[in-house]
Image: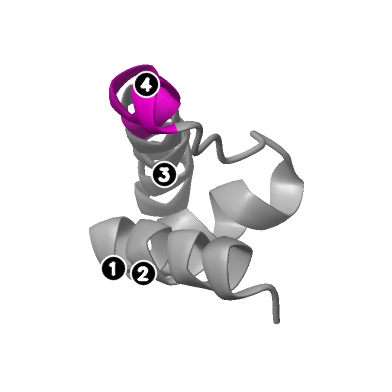
Amino acid sequence: MKYIKKFIMGTFLIYAFNVIAVNLNIVIPINIWTMCFTMLFDFVGIIVIVLIMTVGV
């Protein structure tokens, strides 16, 4: 139950970030990999995803 809650909260966190960052042309796709990464690392995971997207690793 704890993991389902974290999975759903990670999805909402990605969605909230996308709503805020759309003006900066930064959009994180909502798929299984980004949701799991955000579930494991919370907001730090979103920051890492954005850094990977901007650096292009």
What residue type is disc 4 on? Asn
- Looking at the image, residue 56 sits to the left or right of residue 7; the answer is right
Circle 3 is placed at which residue position? Answer: 1
What residue type is disc 3 on? Met
Circle 4 is placed at which residue position? Answer: 23
Q: Are marks 2 and 1 in contact (CB under 8 Å)?
A: yes
Q: Estimate the spatial distance between the alpha carbons at disc 1 and disc 3, rounded to whole Å.
A: 22 Å
Badge 4 or badge 2: first in the primary sequence: 4
What residue type is disc 2 on? Phe
- Disc 3 or disc 4, which is closer to the eye? 4
Rendered location of residue 34, percent (x, y): 61, 52
Circle 2 is placed at which residue position? Answer: 41
Task: Please tell me whether residue 35 belongs to the stretch shown in magenta.
Answer: no
Rendered location of residue 11, percent (x, y): 47, 33
Name the residue at 26% across, 57% down.
Answer: 43
- Per the image, label 4 sits on a secondary structure element best described as helix
- Looking at the image, residue 34 sits to the left or right of residue 4; the answer is right
Q: Estimate the spatial distance between the alpha carbons at disc 2 and disc 3, rounded to whole Å.
A: 18 Å
- Disc 4 or disc 2, which is closer to the eye? 4
Please state the extent of the stretch shown in magenta in the rendering. Answer: 17-24
Badge 2 or badge 3: first in the primary sequence: 3
Q: Estimate the spatial distance between the alpha carbons at disc 3 and disc 4, rounded to whole Å.
A: 35 Å
Is residue 36 shown to the viewer in this render? yes
Total numbered labels? 4
Counting other residues with Cα less than 10 Å from the Cα at mark 2, is it few (<14), some (14-19), or many (20 or more)?
Answer: some
